[in-house]
Image: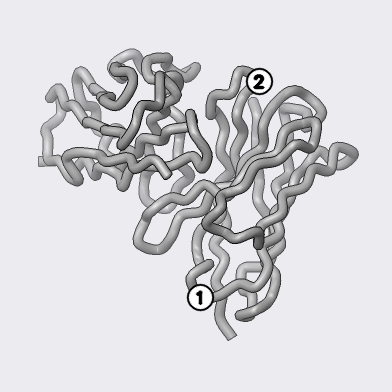
Amino acid sequence: DIQMTQSPSSLSASIGDRVTIACRASQGVRNFLAWFQQKPGKAPKSLIYAATSLQDGVPSRFAGSGSGTDFTLTISSLQPEDFATYYCQQYDNYPHTFGQGTRLEIK
Amino acid sequence: QVLLQESGPGLVKPSGTLSLTCAVSGASTSNRNWWIWVRQFPGKGLEWIGEIYYSARSNYNPSLKSRATISLDKSNNQFSLKLTSVTAADTAVYYCARFSANYHPDYWGQGLLVTVSS
């Protein structure tokens, strides 16, 4: 199985900050990489697919980059509703696998 | 707007079979999409269980050792998961989700907590 490793595991930031979350795959996954946001007790929400494409309705302050083994999710200016846990997922190879999550907290 | 809603028992006995259904609205299971099951363990880790295509072709996570079966019910616009020989390790929130026709994730259900306990 492809291992997905996110860093950091947790992050404290303030409203208006720019934050970056990294996701590394144990082998190349081309651009078959998605990012999800999850709030406590809620279902994951798809943010980005194909490494860089924004899902419909997702604010443009979210951006994805990368290809192969190294990917990043950037939030350009944190808003109160952005404090949540973020996961990456590769869907290039079976079984699809997820990162362990990055918890984004208010500083 | 595509909506997915999981349903099924919230409590299953050890060695029994977990059976869940995902009702789809706002989209047709007869269209060229993939329908997915994912679970989230109490420690928050996520595991991909498997998927089924509109043609009924399916793929599964080998870690489940053939215990999982996903089926499609086009007449009722829903799909289902059966997981046999469950143990406490199968306790999780189960989510259904969709991959679009060009094979990208988009919609998720709200999730259903299933506890395996006697």
Contact (Cβ within 8 Å) of mark 2 with mark 1:
no
Q: Are marks 2 and 1 on the same chain?
A: yes
Task: Identify the image quadrant of residue B8.
Answer: bottom right
**Residue closer to the observer: B26 or A26:** A26
Query: What chain is tagged by disc 1?
Result: B
Type of colouring: one colour
Identified at 41% across, 35% down, the residue is A89
Q: Secondary structure at mark 2?
A: loop
Three-letter code for the amino acid on which mark 1 is drawn: Ala
The percent coordinates of residue A38 (x first, y second) are: 38, 42
What residue is pinned by disc 2? Answer: B101
Quadrant (top left, top right, bottom left, bottom right) of the N terminus of chain A: top left
What residue is pinned by disc 1? Answer: B88
Identified at 17% across, 45% down, the residue is A10
Residue A12's place in the image compared with A50, above or below, is below
Three-letter code for the amino acid on which mark 2 is drawn: Ala
Identified at 43% across, 50% down, the residue is B46
Q: Is residue B73 left or right of residue B59?
A: right
The percent coordinates of residue A21 (x first, y second) are: 22, 31
Query: What chain is tagged by disc 2?
Result: B
Quadrant (top left, top right, bottom left, bottom right) of the C terminus of chain A: top left
Q: Secondary structure at mark 1?
A: helix
